[in-house]
Amino acid sequence: MPIRQFDVQRFSVTSAKSFEDVIQAVHDAIGHPNLAVMQREVAATKTYGGMEAIINNATGPSGLMEFMRLDMGMYLAKGRTGKTPRSHRLLVGNPLIMRRMAEHVPDTASYAPVTILIDEREDGVQLSYDRMASFLASYANAAASAVAVDLDRKVEAMLTAAAG
Protein backbone atom coordinates (compact mmCIF):
# COMPACT_ATOMS: atom_id res chain seq x y z
CA MET A 1 0.00 0.00 0.00
CA PRO A 2 1.77 3.17 -1.17
CA ILE A 3 1.92 6.26 0.98
CA ARG A 4 1.87 9.65 -0.76
CA GLN A 5 3.40 12.67 0.93
CA PHE A 6 2.12 16.19 0.29
CA ASP A 7 3.65 19.59 0.69
CA VAL A 8 0.46 21.61 1.17
CA GLN A 9 0.41 25.35 0.56
CA ARG A 10 -1.95 27.41 2.71
CA PHE A 11 -3.31 30.68 1.41
CA SER A 12 -4.37 33.09 4.18
CA VAL A 13 -5.63 36.64 4.23
CA THR A 14 -6.51 38.68 7.31
CA SER A 15 -9.42 41.09 7.39
CA ALA A 16 -10.07 44.09 9.60
CA LYS A 17 -13.80 43.59 8.96
CA SER A 18 -16.02 42.01 11.58
CA PHE A 19 -16.47 38.24 11.66
CA GLU A 20 -20.13 38.70 10.68
CA ASP A 21 -19.24 40.89 7.70
CA VAL A 22 -16.64 38.43 6.42
CA ILE A 23 -19.02 35.48 6.82
CA GLN A 24 -21.73 37.43 4.99
CA ALA A 25 -19.40 38.33 2.13
CA VAL A 26 -18.44 34.68 1.63
CA HIS A 27 -22.09 33.63 2.00
CA ASP A 28 -23.08 36.09 -0.73
CA ALA A 29 -20.37 34.81 -3.09
CA ILE A 30 -21.35 31.12 -3.00
CA GLY A 31 -24.51 29.23 -3.88
CA HIS A 32 -26.62 27.48 -1.26
CA PRO A 33 -28.47 24.69 -3.01
CA ASN A 34 -30.69 22.14 -1.39
CA LEU A 35 -28.15 19.35 -1.88
CA ALA A 36 -30.69 16.52 -1.67
CA VAL A 37 -32.79 18.11 -4.41
CA MET A 38 -29.74 18.89 -6.52
CA GLN A 39 -28.45 15.32 -6.23
CA ARG A 40 -31.85 13.92 -7.24
CA GLU A 41 -31.94 16.25 -10.25
CA VAL A 42 -28.39 15.31 -11.30
CA ALA A 43 -29.20 11.60 -10.90
CA ALA A 44 -32.33 12.01 -13.04
CA THR A 45 -30.70 13.91 -15.91
CA LYS A 46 -29.51 11.85 -18.86
CA THR A 47 -26.84 14.21 -20.23
CA TYR A 48 -23.73 16.06 -19.19
CA GLY A 49 -25.38 19.27 -20.41
CA GLY A 50 -28.33 18.64 -18.12
CA MET A 51 -26.02 18.09 -15.17
CA GLU A 52 -24.04 21.18 -16.06
CA ALA A 53 -27.19 23.32 -16.11
CA ILE A 54 -28.33 22.01 -12.72
CA ILE A 55 -24.95 22.65 -11.11
CA ASN A 56 -24.44 26.06 -12.72
CA ASN A 57 -27.85 27.08 -11.41
CA ALA A 58 -26.73 26.11 -7.89
CA THR A 59 -23.50 28.11 -7.78
CA GLY A 60 -23.08 31.68 -6.64
CA PRO A 61 -21.24 34.56 -8.34
CA SER A 62 -17.92 32.86 -7.49
CA GLY A 63 -18.90 29.73 -9.42
CA LEU A 64 -18.86 27.81 -6.13
CA MET A 65 -21.49 26.39 -3.80
CA GLU A 66 -21.65 25.51 -0.11
CA PHE A 67 -21.82 21.83 0.76
CA MET A 68 -21.52 22.18 4.53
CA ARG A 69 -20.81 24.74 7.24
CA LEU A 70 -19.41 23.73 10.61
CA ASP A 71 -19.40 26.09 13.58
CA MET A 72 -16.03 25.08 15.05
CA GLY A 73 -16.19 27.93 17.57
CA MET A 74 -19.09 26.22 19.32
CA TYR A 75 -16.73 23.36 20.22
CA LEU A 76 -13.85 25.66 21.11
CA ALA A 77 -16.05 27.60 23.53
CA LYS A 78 -16.99 24.68 25.77
CA GLY A 79 -15.22 24.80 29.11
CA ARG A 80 -13.64 28.19 28.48
CA THR A 81 -14.29 31.39 30.32
CA GLY A 82 -14.34 34.77 28.66
CA LYS A 83 -14.69 35.52 24.98
CA THR A 84 -14.03 32.63 22.65
CA PRO A 85 -12.94 33.42 19.11
CA ARG A 86 -15.47 32.40 16.48
CA SER A 87 -14.49 29.87 13.85
CA HIS A 88 -16.39 28.46 10.86
CA ARG A 89 -15.25 25.73 8.52
CA LEU A 90 -16.96 25.73 5.13
CA LEU A 91 -16.86 22.99 2.53
CA VAL A 92 -17.27 24.67 -0.84
CA GLY A 93 -16.76 23.65 -4.41
CA ASN A 94 -18.24 22.89 -7.77
CA PRO A 95 -18.83 19.29 -8.87
CA LEU A 96 -18.02 20.21 -12.47
CA ILE A 97 -14.56 21.41 -11.43
CA MET A 98 -14.01 18.30 -9.31
CA ARG A 99 -15.05 16.13 -12.24
CA ARG A 100 -12.56 17.83 -14.56
CA MET A 101 -9.73 17.11 -12.11
CA ALA A 102 -10.86 13.59 -11.17
CA GLU A 103 -10.95 12.55 -14.83
CA HIS A 104 -7.15 12.79 -14.70
CA VAL A 105 -6.45 12.11 -11.01
CA PRO A 106 -9.22 10.07 -9.34
CA ASP A 107 -7.85 10.89 -5.85
CA THR A 108 -9.01 14.48 -6.42
CA ALA A 109 -12.46 13.43 -5.23
CA SER A 110 -11.04 13.05 -1.71
CA TYR A 111 -9.88 16.70 -1.67
CA ALA A 112 -12.97 18.33 -3.16
CA PRO A 113 -15.04 20.09 -2.05
CA VAL A 114 -12.37 22.26 -0.49
CA THR A 115 -12.21 23.59 3.05
CA ILE A 116 -12.22 27.26 3.92
CA LEU A 117 -11.53 28.25 7.52
CA ILE A 118 -12.76 31.64 8.74
CA ASP A 119 -11.74 32.41 12.29
CA GLU A 120 -11.15 35.31 14.66
CA ARG A 121 -7.58 35.92 15.75
CA GLU A 122 -5.86 38.68 17.67
CA ASP A 123 -4.93 40.50 14.46
CA GLY A 124 -8.34 40.18 12.77
CA VAL A 125 -10.50 37.67 10.97
CA GLN A 126 -8.39 35.15 9.09
CA LEU A 127 -9.59 33.38 5.95
CA SER A 128 -7.52 30.30 5.09
CA TYR A 129 -7.54 27.80 2.25
CA ASP A 130 -5.24 24.89 1.39
CA ARG A 131 -4.42 25.11 -2.30
CA MET A 132 -5.77 22.29 -4.44
CA ALA A 133 -2.77 22.55 -6.77
CA SER A 134 -0.49 21.67 -3.86
CA PHE A 135 -2.56 18.54 -3.12
CA LEU A 136 -2.28 17.45 -6.74
CA ALA A 137 1.37 18.38 -7.34
CA SER A 138 2.73 14.96 -6.37
CA TYR A 139 0.52 13.31 -9.02
CA ALA A 140 2.42 15.18 -11.76
CA ASN A 141 -0.61 15.47 -14.03
CA ALA A 142 -0.57 18.70 -16.02
CA ALA A 143 -4.26 18.61 -16.98
CA ALA A 144 -5.51 18.13 -13.42
CA SER A 145 -3.01 20.68 -12.12
CA ALA A 146 -4.21 23.32 -14.58
CA VAL A 147 -7.80 22.90 -13.35
CA ALA A 148 -6.56 23.00 -9.74
CA VAL A 149 -4.65 26.24 -10.31
CA ASP A 150 -7.79 27.80 -11.79
CA LEU A 151 -9.81 26.64 -8.77
CA ASP A 152 -7.19 28.09 -6.42
CA ARG A 153 -7.41 31.46 -8.19
CA LYS A 154 -11.20 31.40 -7.94
CA VAL A 155 -11.22 30.60 -4.21
CA GLU A 156 -8.41 33.01 -3.37
CA ALA A 157 -10.08 35.86 -5.29
CA MET A 158 -13.32 35.23 -3.40
CA LEU A 159 -11.52 35.20 -0.03
CA THR A 160 -9.53 38.32 -0.85
CA ALA A 161 -12.71 40.14 -1.86
CA ALA A 162 -14.52 38.96 1.28
CA ALA A 163 -11.63 40.19 3.43
CA GLY A 164 -12.08 43.61 1.79
Image (cartoon, helix red, strand yellow):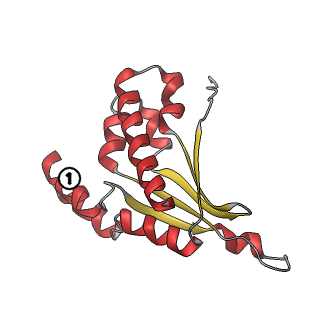
What residue is drawn where x is 41% and y is 28%?
A: 145
Rendered-image quadrant of the N terminus: top right
Q: Is residue 142 left or right of residue 20?
A: left
| Residue 22 image point, x, y percent | 51, 67
Disc 1 packing (10 Å; few <14; some 14–19; many ≥20): many
Q: Position of residue 139 (x, y in %)?
A: 49, 23
Residue 123, image quadrant: bottom right
Q: Quadrant of residue 141?
A: top left
Does residue 47 appear in this view? no
Does residue 154 appear anywhere in the picture? yes
Q: Nearer the viewer, residue 71 or 82?
A: 82
User: Horizontal and vertical percent for residue 164?
Assistant: 48, 61
Image quarter for residue 124? bottom right
Position above or below: 35 against 12 = below
Residue at 66 percent across and 67 percent down: it is: 72
Q: How many marks?
A: 1
Q: Position of residue 117 (x, y in %)?
A: 59, 57
| Residue 164 in the figure: left or right of residue 9 | left
Task: Name the residue rendered at 45%, 37% in the picture.
Answer: 108
State the SS at label 1: helix
Residue where numbered disc 1 is placed = 51
Residue closer to the observer: 134 or 103: 134
Q: What's under tag 1, amino acid-wise?
A: Met
Is 126 on the left or on the right of 67, as rendered? Answer: right
- The residue positioned 64% from the left and 27% from the top of the image is 5
